[in-house]
Amino acid sequence: MATYLVVIGKTNTGYSAHCPDVLGCAVTGKTVEAVVRRMKAALQFHFEGMAEDGDPIPKPSGTASYEQVVNDLDAEQYLIAHVQVDTKQFARAATGR
């Protein structure tokens, strides 16, 4: 399992989220719980596509990314979470194993 950082921001209609380690992967939802659930599904879908294309799956950058994000965020507008994704299945698919 790999653990990915998720940055969640409040919007006029709910919440939006993105994963700094996986460019282009973002979701929205009415609740924080919905956004976290959708982000996990979005990451899995994103990684499936990357594996089909033969692209490497991005590795989480770990605590260093948390420190950077926390330093840059307005704590009143954003929060951080994390999701775990089994990336081994995608690595096998990308290499054809």
Image (tube, helix red, strand yellow):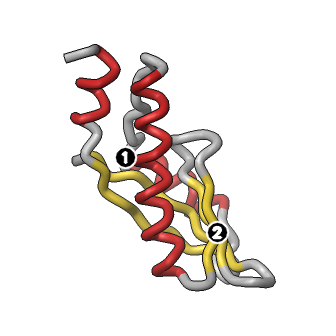
Residue 91 percent coordinates (x, y): 28, 26
The residue shown at (46%, 45%) is: 45
**Would you say 29 lies left or right of 22 here?**
right
Is 14 rendered above or below residue 49? below
**Would you say 77 lies left or right of 7 here?**
right
Q: Nearer the viewer, residue 2 or 69?
A: 2
Q: In which quarter of the image is residue 28?
A: bottom right
Disc 2 + disc 1, Cβ < 8 Å: no
Amino acid type, callout 1: Gly
Q: Which residue is tagged 1?
A: 62
Circle 2 Cα neighbour tier, 10 Å, few/some/many (<14 / 14–19 / ≥20): many
Is 86 rendered above or below residue 56? below
**Would you say 32 lies left or right of 84 here?**
right
Q: Nearer the viewer, residue 76 or 37?
A: 37
Give me the disc on residue 28: 2
Is 84 rendered above or below residue 16? above
